[in-house]
Image (spheres, helix red, strand yellow):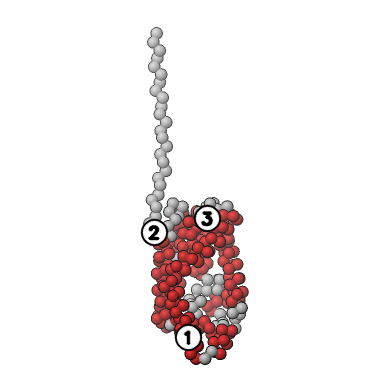
Amino acid sequence: MSASPLPPVASTPSPIPAPVAPSMSEGARIINTFIAPSKTFTDLRRNAKWWAPWLLISIFSVAFISTIGKLIGYEQVSKNQIERSAKQAEQFDKLPPDQQATRLQVSAKFFRVFAYGSPFLILFFTLISTTALWATFKVGAAADTTFGQAYAISMYAGLPGIIGAILGIVSLFAGVSPEGFDINNPVGTNLAYFLDPDTTGKFIRGMASSFDVLIIWSIILIGIGYASTSKVKRSTAIMIVAGWYLVYKIITSGLATLG
C-alpha cells in the first residue's frame, strides 16, 4: 500500500515593507519650517544638511547691514552707540575733534567688516549655542539627537530672523531717523523697543528685549526640533531652550549695566 502524499505546505507571505516617504527638498524644508515645522525637523533624522537656511539667513543679514550703511551710515551707527553709554560718551567728548573722527572711522570699518563677514559669524555663534544646547539635551534629557542634527535644528530655527531683516529694511526705507537708530534693537518686535532709554535702566531694557516675537518663535522651533529627532517631550524641550536663553539674557543684561 503506497503512502499518501503529504499535503502542500502553505508558504508564508513575506511582509510588505512599509513605504518610505521621499526625502524633502531644501525648499520644502524651509517652507515647512514656517507652516509645518515637525515635518522639517523629522526629516533631519535622514539628512541633516543645514546649508540652505544658512545661505538664506546670510543673504538677508548682509542685505540688512548693507542697507544700514547706505541709509544710516556706519559712522552714525557708531556715534549712536557711543551716545547710549554714559561712560563712552564722556570719554568721547574729551577727545579732540581729529581723534573723534578717527574713532568713528575705525568703528565704521568694523561695521563694514561685520556686514560682509556676518555669514561666518552666523556659523560660529550657531556652533556655540548648539554645543551648549546639545550637551544639555544629551546629559539632562537623554536625547539621541546627533550633533549634526542639532546644528541643523539651530539653523532652521533661525529662519524667523529673516522676517526681522525684512522689517528692518522696510523701516529704513520708510525713513528712520539716523540719530535715533539703534542697531542693537532696530525693529519693534520686542518690548524693549518701546521703552524710553533715558528713563529705563539697562538691565530692565535688556530683559525686556527677551520678550521678542521672533526669538520666542525660534525658541519654540528649536524645542520642536529636539522633540522631533529624539524622544524628549516637546514641552520639556521648549523649557530647556527657554531656560538657557533666560540665563543668557540675565548675564548679558547684567554686563550691559557696566558699560
Structural crowding at the residue carrying mark 3, measured as other residues with C-alpha within 10 Å and reported as few (<14), some (14–19) or many (≥20): many
Numbered mark located on residue 26 in the image: 2
State the quadrant of the N terminus: top left
State the CA–CA distance, disc 2 to disc 1.
Answer: 46 Å
For residue 102, the mark is: 1
Q: Which residue is mark 3?
A: 227
Horizontal side, residue 8 vs residue 194: left or right: left
Decide if residue 169 is on the left or right side of residue 127: left
- Identity, as a three-letter code, of the amino acid under mark 1: Thr
Q: State which mark lies toward you, 2 or 1.
A: 1
Report how many numbered discs are placed on residues in the image.
Answer: 3
- The disc, 1 or 3, on the residue closer to the chain's N-terminal end is 1
Distance in Å between CA atoms under marks 1 and 3? 51 Å
Image point 51% across, 68% down: which residue?
215
- In percent of width and height, residue 126 lies at 49, 64
Q: Residue at x 56, y 90 (%)?
A: 94
Mark seen at residue 61: none
Q: Residue furthest top?
A: 1
Please tell me how crowded label 1 is: few (under 14), some (14-19), or many (20+) other residues with Cα within 10 Å: few
**Which residue appears farthest toward the bottom when viewing the image?**
96
Place of residue 66 in the rendered image (x, y in percent of width and height, measured from the top left): 40, 76
> Dividing the picture into quarters, in which one does residue 5 lie?
top left
Amino acid of disc 3: Ala
